[in-house]
Amino acid sequence: MAINVIRHTIAAIFLLLLALPTVKQYFFFNPGVRWLYILIFSFAASYFLTPFCRMAAIRINILDRPDWRKTHHDPTPLLGGLGVYLAFLLSLLFNNVFYPGMKILLLGASLILIVGLWDDIRPIPALLKFIIQVLISLMIISFGNIQLTFFYHTPFAPFINIPLTVLWIVGITNAMNFFDGLDGLATTMSIIIAAFLGVIAFKTDQPALGWFSVALAGSCMGFMPYNFRVGRPALLFLGDTGSTFLGFTLAGLAVLGRWSNTSHFVSLTAPIIIFSVLIFDMIYVNLSRIKNRLARNFFELLTCVNRDHLHHRLLLMGFKGKEAVFIIAVISACLGVSALIIMNQNIIEAILGLSQAVMILGLTVILMLKGREIIPKEGDRRVLRRRKEDYKAPDTM
Protein backbone atom coordinates (compact mmCIF):
# COMPACT_ATOMS: atom_id res chain seq x y z
CA MET A 1 0.00 0.00 0.00
CA ALA A 2 2.82 2.43 0.94
CA ILE A 3 4.61 1.73 -2.34
CA ASN A 4 1.43 2.49 -4.27
CA VAL A 5 1.00 5.79 -2.43
CA ILE A 6 4.59 6.75 -3.21
CA ARG A 7 4.17 5.90 -6.90
CA HIS A 8 0.93 7.85 -7.04
CA THR A 9 2.55 10.86 -5.38
CA ILE A 10 5.47 10.75 -7.84
CA ALA A 11 3.01 10.66 -10.75
CA ALA A 12 1.20 13.71 -9.34
CA ILE A 13 4.44 15.67 -8.92
CA PHE A 14 5.54 14.66 -12.41
CA LEU A 15 2.25 15.92 -13.83
CA LEU A 16 2.64 19.26 -12.08
CA LEU A 17 6.16 19.65 -13.48
CA LEU A 18 4.99 18.80 -16.99
CA ALA A 19 2.24 21.39 -16.71
CA LEU A 20 4.79 24.18 -16.24
CA PRO A 21 5.08 26.17 -19.52
CA THR A 22 8.85 26.55 -19.12
CA VAL A 23 9.44 22.80 -18.83
CA LYS A 24 7.18 22.10 -21.78
CA GLN A 25 8.77 24.69 -24.03
CA TYR A 26 12.46 24.23 -23.13
CA PHE A 27 12.72 20.45 -22.83
CA PHE A 28 10.24 19.31 -25.47
CA PHE A 29 8.87 21.93 -27.87
CA ASN A 30 12.15 23.69 -28.68
CA PRO A 31 14.04 20.43 -29.41
CA GLY A 32 11.15 19.34 -31.66
CA VAL A 33 9.90 16.39 -29.60
CA ARG A 34 6.41 17.61 -28.82
CA TRP A 35 5.14 14.07 -29.39
CA LEU A 36 7.32 12.84 -26.50
CA TYR A 37 5.84 15.47 -24.18
CA ILE A 38 2.30 14.40 -25.12
CA LEU A 39 3.20 10.73 -24.62
CA ILE A 40 4.72 11.31 -21.17
CA PHE A 41 1.93 13.66 -20.09
CA SER A 42 -0.88 11.31 -21.17
CA PHE A 43 0.86 8.35 -19.52
CA ALA A 44 1.34 10.19 -16.22
CA ALA A 45 -2.23 11.55 -16.25
CA SER A 46 -3.72 8.11 -16.87
CA TYR A 47 -1.49 6.48 -14.24
CA PHE A 48 -2.55 9.13 -11.73
CA LEU A 49 -6.30 9.11 -12.48
CA THR A 50 -6.95 5.37 -12.84
CA PRO A 51 -6.89 4.50 -9.09
CA PHE A 52 -9.57 7.15 -8.45
CA CYS A 53 -11.75 5.53 -11.11
CA ARG A 54 -11.25 2.16 -9.42
CA MET A 55 -12.24 3.56 -6.04
CA ALA A 56 -15.34 5.17 -7.59
CA ALA A 57 -16.34 1.91 -9.27
CA ILE A 58 -16.04 -0.01 -5.99
CA ARG A 59 -17.90 2.67 -4.06
CA ILE A 60 -20.91 2.74 -6.40
CA ASN A 61 -20.72 -1.00 -7.14
CA ILE A 62 -19.90 -0.88 -10.85
CA LEU A 63 -18.34 -4.32 -11.08
CA ASP A 64 -17.85 -6.90 -13.82
CA ARG A 65 -19.10 -10.13 -12.30
CA PRO A 66 -17.90 -13.48 -13.68
CA ASP A 67 -20.20 -15.59 -15.82
CA TRP A 68 -19.91 -18.62 -18.11
CA ARG A 69 -18.20 -16.77 -20.98
CA LYS A 70 -15.75 -14.58 -19.04
CA THR A 71 -12.20 -15.45 -18.08
CA HIS A 72 -11.91 -13.73 -14.68
CA HIS A 73 -13.04 -15.39 -11.45
CA ASP A 74 -13.75 -12.50 -9.07
CA PRO A 75 -15.94 -9.40 -9.40
CA THR A 76 -13.66 -6.68 -10.80
CA PRO A 77 -14.21 -2.90 -10.85
CA LEU A 78 -14.97 -1.26 -14.17
CA LEU A 79 -14.54 2.44 -15.15
CA GLY A 80 -10.90 2.04 -16.14
CA GLY A 81 -11.88 3.52 -19.48
CA LEU A 82 -12.96 6.71 -17.73
CA GLY A 83 -9.40 7.29 -16.53
CA VAL A 84 -8.06 6.67 -20.04
CA TYR A 85 -10.60 9.14 -21.47
CA LEU A 86 -9.84 11.88 -18.94
CA ALA A 87 -6.09 11.55 -19.47
CA PHE A 88 -6.58 11.66 -23.24
CA LEU A 89 -8.83 14.72 -22.99
CA LEU A 90 -6.37 16.56 -20.72
CA SER A 91 -3.52 15.80 -23.12
CA LEU A 92 -5.43 17.30 -26.03
CA LEU A 93 -6.52 20.38 -24.10
CA PHE A 94 -3.06 21.07 -22.63
CA ASN A 95 -1.44 20.80 -26.05
CA ASN A 96 -4.18 22.22 -28.30
CA VAL A 97 -3.65 19.55 -30.95
CA PHE A 98 -7.02 19.92 -32.64
CA TYR A 99 -7.24 19.54 -36.41
CA PRO A 100 -10.36 20.13 -38.56
CA GLY A 101 -12.81 17.39 -37.63
CA MET A 102 -11.05 16.41 -34.39
CA LYS A 103 -13.42 18.32 -32.12
CA ILE A 104 -16.45 16.63 -33.67
CA LEU A 105 -14.70 13.25 -33.41
CA LEU A 106 -13.93 13.93 -29.75
CA LEU A 107 -17.57 14.92 -29.17
CA GLY A 108 -18.76 11.70 -30.77
CA ALA A 109 -16.25 9.66 -28.76
CA SER A 110 -17.45 11.38 -25.57
CA LEU A 111 -21.06 10.45 -26.37
CA ILE A 112 -19.99 6.85 -27.03
CA LEU A 113 -18.21 6.87 -23.67
CA ILE A 114 -21.40 8.06 -21.94
CA VAL A 115 -23.38 5.27 -23.61
CA GLY A 116 -20.73 2.76 -22.50
CA LEU A 117 -20.85 4.11 -18.95
CA TRP A 118 -24.62 3.76 -18.97
CA ASP A 119 -24.23 0.18 -20.17
CA ASP A 120 -21.71 -0.61 -17.42
CA ILE A 121 -24.07 0.72 -14.76
CA ARG A 122 -27.28 -0.72 -16.16
CA PRO A 123 -27.07 -2.90 -19.30
CA ILE A 124 -28.66 -1.39 -22.42
CA PRO A 125 -30.53 -3.58 -24.93
CA ALA A 126 -28.13 -4.48 -27.73
CA LEU A 127 -30.39 -3.11 -30.46
CA LEU A 128 -30.78 0.25 -28.71
CA LYS A 129 -27.02 0.51 -28.21
CA PHE A 130 -26.44 -0.29 -31.89
CA ILE A 131 -28.93 2.39 -33.00
CA ILE A 132 -27.26 4.99 -30.76
CA GLN A 133 -23.85 4.10 -32.19
CA VAL A 134 -25.17 4.50 -35.74
CA LEU A 135 -26.71 7.89 -34.90
CA ILE A 136 -23.49 9.16 -33.32
CA SER A 137 -21.54 7.96 -36.36
CA LEU A 138 -23.94 9.84 -38.66
CA MET A 139 -23.48 12.91 -36.48
CA ILE A 140 -19.70 13.03 -36.90
CA ILE A 141 -20.09 12.33 -40.62
CA SER A 142 -22.56 15.21 -41.02
CA PHE A 143 -20.92 17.85 -38.83
CA GLY A 144 -17.27 16.84 -39.07
CA ASN A 145 -17.17 15.75 -42.70
CA ILE A 146 -15.53 12.55 -41.48
CA GLN A 147 -16.20 9.89 -44.06
CA LEU A 148 -14.50 7.35 -46.27
CA THR A 149 -14.00 8.43 -49.89
CA PHE A 150 -14.22 5.37 -52.08
CA PHE A 151 -15.81 7.50 -54.79
CA TYR A 152 -15.36 11.17 -55.70
CA HIS A 153 -17.58 13.69 -57.50
CA THR A 154 -20.31 11.31 -58.56
CA PRO A 155 -24.04 11.64 -57.78
CA PHE A 156 -24.17 8.26 -56.02
CA ALA A 157 -20.95 8.73 -53.98
CA PRO A 158 -22.67 9.70 -50.67
CA PHE A 159 -24.96 6.63 -50.91
CA ILE A 160 -21.86 4.41 -50.85
CA ASN A 161 -19.36 6.41 -48.80
CA ILE A 162 -21.67 7.21 -45.87
CA PRO A 163 -23.00 3.65 -45.25
CA LEU A 164 -19.45 2.26 -45.53
CA THR A 165 -18.22 4.87 -43.03
CA VAL A 166 -20.97 3.96 -40.57
CA LEU A 167 -20.20 0.26 -41.05
CA TRP A 168 -16.50 0.91 -40.42
CA ILE A 169 -16.97 3.04 -37.29
CA VAL A 170 -19.69 0.93 -35.67
CA GLY A 171 -17.93 -2.31 -36.66
CA ILE A 172 -14.54 -1.31 -35.19
CA THR A 173 -16.23 0.09 -32.07
CA ASN A 174 -17.87 -3.25 -31.33
CA ALA A 175 -14.88 -5.32 -32.47
CA MET A 176 -12.73 -3.56 -29.86
CA ASN A 177 -15.43 -4.18 -27.28
CA PHE A 178 -15.39 -7.90 -28.12
CA PHE A 179 -11.61 -7.95 -27.70
CA ASP A 180 -11.89 -6.68 -24.15
CA GLY A 181 -12.01 -10.27 -22.92
CA LEU A 182 -8.52 -10.76 -21.47
CA ASP A 183 -6.48 -8.60 -19.14
CA GLY A 184 -4.70 -5.98 -21.22
CA LEU A 185 -5.87 -7.23 -24.64
CA ALA A 186 -8.05 -4.32 -25.80
CA THR A 187 -5.58 -1.83 -24.29
CA THR A 188 -2.61 -3.46 -26.01
CA MET A 189 -4.44 -3.53 -29.34
CA SER A 190 -5.32 0.15 -28.95
CA ILE A 191 -1.69 1.06 -28.21
CA ILE A 192 -0.43 -0.82 -31.28
CA ILE A 193 -3.07 0.61 -33.62
CA ALA A 194 -2.63 4.16 -32.31
CA ALA A 195 1.17 3.86 -32.58
CA PHE A 196 1.10 2.78 -36.23
CA LEU A 197 -1.49 5.41 -37.14
CA GLY A 198 0.73 7.98 -35.41
CA VAL A 199 3.85 6.90 -37.28
CA ILE A 200 2.07 7.08 -40.63
CA ALA A 201 0.56 10.45 -39.70
CA PHE A 202 4.03 11.90 -39.07
CA LYS A 203 5.34 10.32 -42.29
CA THR A 204 2.52 11.96 -44.27
CA ASP A 205 2.99 15.44 -42.70
CA GLN A 206 -0.06 15.32 -40.44
CA PRO A 207 1.47 16.20 -37.06
CA ALA A 208 -1.84 16.99 -35.36
CA LEU A 209 -3.13 13.51 -36.17
CA GLY A 210 0.17 12.09 -34.93
CA TRP A 211 -0.14 13.93 -31.62
CA PHE A 212 -3.75 12.78 -31.33
CA SER A 213 -2.62 9.17 -31.78
CA VAL A 214 0.25 9.57 -29.32
CA ALA A 215 -2.11 11.00 -26.68
CA LEU A 216 -4.39 7.98 -27.02
CA ALA A 217 -1.48 5.52 -26.90
CA GLY A 218 0.03 7.21 -23.83
CA SER A 219 -3.31 7.19 -22.01
CA CYS A 220 -3.65 3.45 -22.63
CA MET A 221 -0.06 2.86 -21.50
CA GLY A 222 -0.76 4.62 -18.19
CA PHE A 223 -3.70 2.29 -17.63
CA MET A 224 -1.75 -0.90 -18.39
CA PRO A 225 0.00 -1.30 -14.98
CA TYR A 226 -3.43 -1.68 -13.37
CA ASN A 227 -4.94 -3.90 -16.07
CA PHE A 228 -2.06 -6.14 -17.18
CA ARG A 229 -0.19 -7.41 -14.13
CA VAL A 230 2.26 -10.29 -14.41
CA GLY A 231 1.15 -13.23 -12.27
CA ARG A 232 -1.82 -11.33 -10.85
CA PRO A 233 -5.33 -10.48 -12.04
CA ALA A 234 -6.30 -7.00 -13.21
CA LEU A 235 -7.20 -4.40 -10.60
CA LEU A 236 -9.89 -3.01 -12.91
CA PHE A 237 -11.20 -3.30 -16.44
CA LEU A 238 -11.85 -0.82 -19.21
CA GLY A 239 -15.52 -1.76 -19.29
CA ASP A 240 -17.77 -0.81 -22.18
CA THR A 241 -16.94 2.75 -21.11
CA GLY A 242 -13.37 2.34 -22.31
CA SER A 243 -13.45 -0.34 -24.99
CA THR A 244 -16.17 1.33 -27.08
CA PHE A 245 -14.53 4.75 -26.61
CA LEU A 246 -11.18 3.41 -27.83
CA GLY A 247 -12.70 1.55 -30.77
CA PHE A 248 -14.78 4.55 -31.87
CA THR A 249 -11.90 7.02 -31.52
CA LEU A 250 -9.43 4.87 -33.45
CA ALA A 251 -12.00 4.12 -36.17
CA GLY A 252 -12.80 7.81 -36.53
CA LEU A 253 -9.12 8.73 -36.58
CA ALA A 254 -8.53 6.24 -39.40
CA VAL A 255 -11.27 7.92 -41.44
CA LEU A 256 -10.11 11.42 -40.59
CA GLY A 257 -6.52 10.93 -41.75
CA ARG A 258 -4.99 10.94 -45.20
CA TRP A 259 -2.64 7.98 -45.00
CA SER A 260 -0.74 8.54 -48.24
CA ASN A 261 0.31 11.72 -50.02
CA THR A 262 0.28 10.15 -53.48
CA SER A 263 -1.91 7.02 -53.56
CA HIS A 264 -5.60 6.90 -52.70
CA PHE A 265 -5.40 3.10 -52.73
CA VAL A 266 -2.66 3.08 -50.08
CA SER A 267 -4.57 5.66 -48.03
CA LEU A 268 -7.54 3.28 -47.87
CA THR A 269 -5.53 0.06 -47.56
CA ALA A 270 -3.09 1.02 -44.78
CA PRO A 271 -5.72 1.46 -42.02
CA ILE A 272 -7.50 -1.73 -43.10
CA ILE A 273 -4.24 -3.68 -42.64
CA ILE A 274 -3.55 -2.05 -39.27
CA PHE A 275 -7.06 -2.91 -38.01
CA SER A 276 -7.21 -6.27 -39.77
CA VAL A 277 -7.06 -8.46 -36.63
CA LEU A 278 -10.18 -6.74 -35.30
CA ILE A 279 -11.87 -6.84 -38.70
CA PHE A 280 -11.03 -10.50 -39.28
CA ASP A 281 -12.23 -11.57 -35.83
CA MET A 282 -15.53 -9.71 -36.23
CA ILE A 283 -16.25 -11.15 -39.69
CA TYR A 284 -15.10 -14.69 -38.91
CA VAL A 285 -17.02 -14.97 -35.63
CA ASN A 286 -20.27 -13.61 -37.06
CA LEU A 287 -20.11 -15.89 -40.11
CA SER A 288 -19.31 -18.82 -37.84
CA ARG A 289 -22.30 -18.07 -35.62
CA ILE A 290 -24.60 -17.88 -38.64
CA LYS A 291 -23.20 -21.12 -40.08
CA ASN A 292 -23.60 -22.94 -36.75
CA ARG A 293 -27.13 -21.53 -36.31
CA LEU A 294 -26.28 -19.69 -33.12
CA ALA A 295 -27.80 -16.63 -34.80
CA ARG A 296 -30.43 -16.75 -37.54
CA ASN A 297 -30.62 -13.03 -38.38
CA PHE A 298 -29.00 -9.66 -37.75
CA PHE A 299 -30.90 -9.01 -34.52
CA GLU A 300 -29.81 -12.33 -33.04
CA LEU A 301 -26.22 -11.52 -34.02
CA LEU A 302 -26.44 -8.40 -31.87
CA THR A 303 -27.37 -10.41 -28.79
CA CYS A 304 -25.44 -13.62 -29.47
CA VAL A 305 -22.52 -14.26 -27.11
CA ASN A 306 -20.10 -17.16 -26.99
CA ARG A 307 -16.49 -18.06 -26.28
CA ASP A 308 -15.47 -18.14 -29.93
CA HIS A 309 -13.29 -15.05 -30.47
CA LEU A 310 -9.60 -15.37 -31.32
CA HIS A 311 -8.45 -14.96 -27.73
CA HIS A 312 -10.96 -17.58 -26.51
CA ARG A 313 -9.68 -20.08 -29.06
CA LEU A 314 -6.09 -19.48 -28.01
CA LEU A 315 -7.11 -20.21 -24.42
CA LEU A 316 -8.78 -23.42 -25.55
CA MET A 317 -5.53 -24.43 -27.27
CA GLY A 318 -3.80 -24.27 -23.88
CA PHE A 319 -2.24 -20.81 -23.90
CA LYS A 320 -2.47 -18.72 -20.75
CA GLY A 321 -4.15 -15.34 -20.82
CA LYS A 322 -0.93 -13.31 -20.94
CA GLU A 323 0.45 -15.61 -23.66
CA ALA A 324 -2.68 -15.14 -25.77
CA VAL A 325 -2.37 -11.36 -25.44
CA PHE A 326 1.27 -11.55 -26.53
CA ILE A 327 0.45 -13.70 -29.58
CA ILE A 328 -2.34 -11.38 -30.74
CA ALA A 329 -0.17 -8.32 -30.11
CA VAL A 330 2.66 -9.75 -32.22
CA ILE A 331 0.24 -10.56 -35.06
CA SER A 332 -1.17 -7.03 -34.92
CA ALA A 333 2.29 -5.44 -34.83
CA CYS A 334 3.43 -7.49 -37.83
CA LEU A 335 0.40 -6.31 -39.77
CA GLY A 336 1.22 -2.74 -38.79
CA VAL A 337 4.71 -3.23 -40.23
CA SER A 338 3.07 -4.46 -43.45
CA ALA A 339 1.12 -1.20 -43.59
CA LEU A 340 4.36 0.77 -43.23
CA ILE A 341 5.99 -1.25 -46.02
CA ILE A 342 3.30 -0.41 -48.58
CA MET A 343 3.76 3.30 -47.79
CA ASN A 344 7.01 3.35 -49.80
CA GLN A 345 5.12 3.31 -53.10
CA ASN A 346 7.59 0.86 -54.67
CA ILE A 347 5.47 -1.75 -56.44
CA ILE A 348 7.68 -4.67 -55.38
CA GLU A 349 7.69 -3.57 -51.74
CA ALA A 350 3.94 -2.94 -51.85
CA ILE A 351 3.34 -6.48 -53.13
CA LEU A 352 5.65 -7.89 -50.46
CA GLY A 353 3.88 -5.89 -47.76
CA LEU A 354 0.44 -7.04 -48.87
CA SER A 355 1.69 -10.63 -49.20
CA GLN A 356 3.04 -10.50 -45.66
CA ALA A 357 -0.31 -9.24 -44.40
CA VAL A 358 -2.15 -12.04 -46.22
CA MET A 359 0.19 -14.71 -44.80
CA ILE A 360 -0.21 -13.37 -41.27
CA LEU A 361 -4.00 -13.41 -41.62
CA GLY A 362 -3.66 -16.95 -42.98
CA LEU A 363 -1.85 -17.89 -39.77
CA THR A 364 -4.71 -16.31 -37.81
CA VAL A 365 -7.21 -18.42 -39.76
CA ILE A 366 -5.24 -21.56 -38.81
CA LEU A 367 -5.34 -20.56 -35.13
CA MET A 368 -9.08 -19.95 -35.32
CA LEU A 369 -9.71 -23.30 -37.03
CA LYS A 370 -7.45 -25.15 -34.60
CA GLY A 371 -9.26 -23.54 -31.68
CA ARG A 372 -12.57 -24.52 -33.23
CA GLU A 373 -11.55 -28.20 -33.24
CA ILE A 374 -11.20 -28.05 -29.46
CA ILE A 375 -14.53 -26.32 -28.84
CA PRO A 376 -17.11 -28.90 -27.70
CA LYS A 377 -19.73 -29.67 -30.32
CA GLU A 378 -22.55 -27.67 -28.80
CA GLY A 379 -25.07 -28.10 -31.56
CA ASP A 380 -27.47 -25.26 -30.96
CA ARG A 381 -28.59 -22.49 -28.63
CA ARG A 382 -30.09 -24.93 -26.12
CA VAL A 383 -26.61 -26.04 -25.03
CA LEU A 384 -25.52 -22.43 -24.58
CA ARG A 385 -28.58 -21.73 -22.44
CA ARG A 386 -27.83 -24.80 -20.32
CA ARG A 387 -24.24 -23.65 -19.80
CA LYS A 388 -25.49 -20.24 -18.66
CA GLU A 389 -28.01 -21.74 -16.23
CA ASP A 390 -25.49 -24.16 -14.73
CA TYR A 391 -22.87 -21.47 -14.07
CA LYS A 392 -22.78 -20.08 -10.56
CA ALA A 393 -20.77 -16.91 -10.12
CA PRO A 394 -18.76 -16.55 -6.90
CA ASP A 395 -20.44 -14.45 -4.20
CA THR A 396 -17.26 -13.19 -2.58
CA MET A 397 -15.15 -10.20 -3.53
Image (cartoon, grey):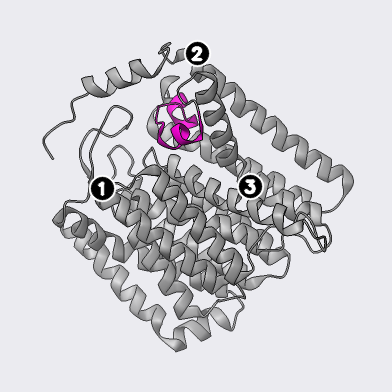
Counting residues from the start of the chain, the first of labels 3 and 2 encountered is 3
The question of residue 171 being in magenta is answered with: no
Counting residues from the start of the chain, the first of labels 3 and 1 encountered is 1
Choose top left, top right, bottom left or bottom right for residue 110: bottom left
**Residue annotated with mark 2:** 373
Residue 126 at x, y = what percent?
39, 43
**Residue annotated with mark 1:** 235
Q: Which residues are magenta?
A: 297-314
| Residue at position x 59%, y 37% in the image | 331
| Residue at position x 16%, y 56% in the image | 60
Task: For residue 179, say whether it is visible.
Answer: no
Q: Secondary structure at mark 1?
A: loop
- Within 10 Å of the Cα at label 3, are there few (<14), some (14-19), or many (20+) other Cα atoms? many
Quadrant location, the C terminus: top left
Q: Of helix, strand and loop, which mostly describes the magenta segment? A: helix
Q: Nearer the viewer, mark 3 or mark 1?
A: 3
Choose top left, top right, bottom left or bottom right for residue 65: top left
325 relative to 378, above or below: below
Q: CA distance from mark 3 to mark 1?
A: 29 Å
- Within 10 Å of the Cα at label 2, are there few (<14), some (14-19), or many (20+) other Cα atoms? few
| Residue at position x 36%, y 50% in the image | 240
- Disc marking residue 274: 3
Q: Secondary structure at mark 2?
A: helix
Say which of 117 and 312 sits in front: 117
- Within 10 Å of the Cα at label 1, are there few (<14), some (14-19), or many (20+) other Cα atoms? some
> Relative to residue 268, is residue 39 drawn left or right?
left
Counting residues from the start of the chain, the first of labels 2 and 1 encountered is 1
Amino acid under disc 2: Glu
> Relative to residue 195, is residue 240 drawn left or right?
left
Amino acid under disc 3: Ile
The question of residue 311 being in magenta is answered with: yes
